[in-house]
Image (tube, rainbow, N blue to C red):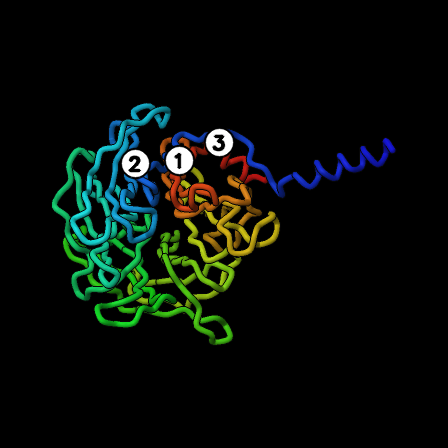
Amino acid sequence: MKIRIILLIFLIILSKQPAMAISGDMETVLVIEPGEENPRNSEGDIIELKDGRLCLIYTRFTGGSGDHAAADLAMRISGNEGKSWSNDRIVVLRPGGLNVMSVSLLRLANGQIALFYLRKTSREDCRPIMCVSTDEAATWSEPSVCIADEIGYYVMNNDRAVQLRSGRLVLPVAWHQGPGQPRDTAGVIMCYLSDDNGRTFRRSKDSYKGYAPDGRRVTVQEPGIVELNDGRLMMFMRTNAESQYISYSRDGGETWSKAQPSALISPLSPASIERIPWSGDLLCVWNDHSGIHNYSKGRRTPLCLAISNDEGETWSKSVIIEDNPDGWYCYTAITFVKNRAMLAYCAGDKKIGGLNRLKVLALSQDCLTSFSLE
């Protein structure tokens, strides 16, 4: 009887062991819960100001929790590395229409801060907007529309705008609809490019749909970009084909290779990839559904990290940072501040709604370094 009890205890303990565990410091520095007056807080980004303060801007919904509900952009500031945060200050009010959402904060080469977000006027008109701050987020310039050539419903996730080493700004977007046109939920991928620091943008030469190796149409949505050491751009995008698809550009985002499946196995959920400044490796945050961790098919859990030291050709075995089976983890913004990686992401669940809670997690340099050495 004792042997059977000991064996049962051992099996329970074994079943609870993760495939790999993070060692080092991992700290939750902020959780913004939904409330009656704002039922959803989501899709934000963080930037470090020149005086060391942290600036978070996120979407604060007031008219419901759906993607088309009324929402404004709210800002919080931390002057002590995330230990405490200011109250909300609304920095962009919804100017009529549906809402404003999906923030990207970018330190431009000239030292200014660019704020990008989606202005959703209707279900046929959703386009990125750009504002600039010359006083470290105290005030912002008048908004300018980044896509002026053709009205349509373009989706650009939070923390997606990039500035290349050449100075070019690249906005990766997925087009889904134009005025009076049928909706294409599967998406058409393209980029908008600026070589004059955001004063004007033009569409990339290439725009493309996604296809599986057997020729079937594949949903491609919510693209992101990272610049590789050899000057190529790597685009990653969520699909309904059970992995992130990858495409490459050798000319600064003008033209792109055919999108192909990758080893980043995932549900229809976005990934985030950025370069770690102290190591030069790539960090990926996504819902790993490769099978090395327990997961429920179709759900955006667990949330995992992996590192690539060969420019995204291969990835390390992932580690879990969130594993609630009822959780819903996505839309991760990655910001490196001094010796920490700050992750801001949706961390909802079945009880409050998957997209309704915003969480900020800090990972120490030692934490990521120990992970990369596993």
Q: Which residue is mark 2?
A: 56
Q: Is residue 150 above or below residue 82?
A: below
Image: 37 above or below 250: above
Quickly name the residue at label 1.
360
Reading the image, the residue beneath label 3 is 26
CB under 8 Å between callouts 3 and 2? no
**Looking at the image, residue 15 lies above or below residue 249:** above
Which residue lies at the image location 55% right of the left edge and 55% below the top edge?
A: 297
> Type of residue at label 3?
Met
At 34% from the left and 47% from the top, the residue drawn is 65
**Residue at the outermost bottom position:** 215
Q: Position of residue 320 (x, y in %)?
A: 54, 42
| Pick the front one: 69 or 172 | 69
Q: Residue at x 75, y 34 (%)?
A: 9
Q: Is residue 200 visible?
A: yes
Say which quadrant the N terminus sits in: top right
- Going from N to C along the chain, the mark reached first, 1 or 3, is 3
Q: Three-letter amino acid code at disc 1? A: Val
Q: Residue furthest front?
A: 36
Mark found first going from the N terminus, 2 or 1: 2
Q: Are marks 2 and 1 in contact (CB under 8 Å)?
A: yes
Name the foreground residue: 82 vs 298.
298
Amino acid on which disc 2 is placed? Leu
Residue in the foreground of this view, choosing between 2 and 332:
2
Question: Label 2 vs label 1: CA separation?
Answer: 10 Å
Q: Is residue 286 left or right of residue 78?
A: right
